[in-house]
Structure formats: C-alpha cells, structure tokens
Amino acid sequence: MSRARVIRMLVVVILLVVALVWVSQTDARPERVSLFVAAVIGAVTAIYALFTYEMLLQNQTMAKAALDSSVLMERSLRFSQTASLLYETRNTKDPTFKSAAGHVTPIENEDYKRALTEFSEGGAQMEFVFAVVKNMGQGSATNLSIEASYNLIDSSNPNRESTVTKRASVPILESRKGVALCIFISKVPTPDDRVSLISAHLAAGDFYRDAIKELPQQVDIDPHTHHFERAADCVVRLA
C-alpha cells in the first residue's frame, strides 16, 4: 500500500477517534445516546467509504497497468508485422536481375515479356529501366499496388519525348525482397536518353493491418528526392 493511502486512512481514523472521545465525554442524556449512535454509524460509514475509495484507486491503477501492457504488446506486434517500402529507379543490361545485389523479382507483365524477348535476341547493348520496390521492414507487405509515371526521352524514336504510366499489383512482398516493374527499353542507348520520374504512388497493407481491417499504408514518392541507381555500364540517364 502506498504512503499516501496509509496517511489518508490514519487521518480518518484519528478524526473518528477524536469524535468518539468527544461524544463519550458528554452528559448521559437521551440526546447524548443518540449522538453516540450517530457517531458510530458515521464512523462505520466513513471507514466503508474510505475502503471503497481505496479499492477504486487500486482498480484504476491495475486498469492503467493493463492498458499500458496491451498498448506495448500491440506496438510490438505491429512493428513485427510492419512493412517498410523503398522505391527506386534502376537501369540495367540484365532484365532478369540474376546478377543484381539483393533478391529482386521482375513483375511478369507484357512489358517484361517484351524485354526478355529483346534480351534473348542478342540485345547486349540494350538497356532496361525498372521501378524497383523493396520491402525493408520486419513483416511482409500485402496487396501491394504500384503506379508510376515517367517522362521518357528516346533519341532512337521519332517521337523523341513521351510520358508513360505503369501499374502493377503484387499479392505479397516478403521482408528483404523486392519487385521490379519494367518502365523503358532502350534498343540503342545514348547519353541523350533520359528517364525522369514524374510521380509514383504505393499502397500496401500487412498481415496485422489486414487482421484488424485497417486501411492500407499509402506512400507518395517525391520525384525530386527519390533514389535512383544506374549501372556502371549503362548510359541512359535517370532522374
């Protein structure tokens, strides 16, 4: 029991003892007997109220401790299941990503199938630009959706400048793994070719969010500060 509670109980007991002593020193008239009975009833009621108050304080303390514990457990569980998405633009001469550092899996859409066809036909000089999303968090990302818009400058194309928007979805992206979305294929790359991010948006949940029916995490990529990585043997410029 805390010191404050002990002091409160001692104060009440002392006041009750003083009141009873005062009542006992009065004259033995009927009024005195009634006063004594009233004092006893008041004393019992006060002690009962004091114990009730102390029980309420104790219950409040226990409830707060239980709430703090549940909040801590919820944060720990959420952290263990949270995904952390990192977006980058990367160019490479190998669209299979077999030689790339880290585990990156290309998204097999029509653009990627065309890239593989071009690559298998001996396009050793060709370059491929991908939007890569990595999960750097502790848990898996679920229902990942990617939407990215880029401005392209292709010196080998009569339509030198164009804008493309690519979309893809991935059911599950595990921790420490990534996916690559094909953005651009340069058959005859030159230093004048350029791929610039206009905007990108990611949305994904995780197993904890899905379990409590929480809305997916929304991530908007800043085109001015987003990360890009150009291979040493590539000439297409990224921005």
Image (cartoon, rainbow, N blue to C red):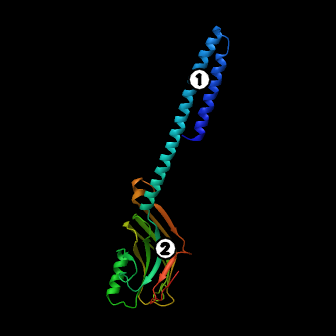
Residue kind at label 1, given as amino acid type: Ala
Q: Nearer the viewer, residue 30 or 152?
A: 30
Task: Kindly check if marks 1 and 2 are in contact, taking CB atoms under 8 A apart as contact.
Answer: no
Locate residue 218, reporting x and y percent. Answer: 49, 63
Locate residue 39, reporting x and y percent. Answer: 61, 19
Q: Name the residue rendered at 39%, 54% in the picture.
A: 211
Image quarter hosting the N terminus: top right
> 29 above or below 219?
above
Q: What element carries label 2?
A: strand
Q: For residue 105, which quarter of the picture?
A: bottom left
Q: Give the number of the mark in front: 1 or 2.
A: 1
Number of marks: 2
Which dot marks residue 117?
A: none
Q: Nearer the viewer, residue 54 or 236?
A: 54
Give the residue at the far top of this rendering. 30
Q: Which of 146 and 11 is in front in this view?
A: 11
> 20 above or below 161?
above
> 122 above or below 137?
below
Q: Nearer the viewer, residue 123 or 216?
A: 216
Q: Which residue is under mark 2?
A: 149
Locate residue 169, reporting x and y percent. Answer: 39, 67
Q: Name the residue rendered at 37%, 76% in the picture.
A: 103
Report the Cα–Cα distance between label 1 and label 2.
Answer: 79 Å
Q: On the rendered structure, is 102 left or right of 59?
A: left
Q: What element carries label 1?
A: helix
Which dot marks residue 43?
A: 1
Q: Name the residue rendered at 47%, 61% in the picture.
A: 217
Residue density around tag 1, few if under 14, some if 14–19, many if 20 or more, within 10 Å:
some
Residue kind at label 2, given as amino acid type: Ser
> 74 above or below 61?
below
> Which one is earlier in the sequence, the residue at label 1 or at label 2?
1
Q: For residue 30, which quarter of the picture?
A: top right
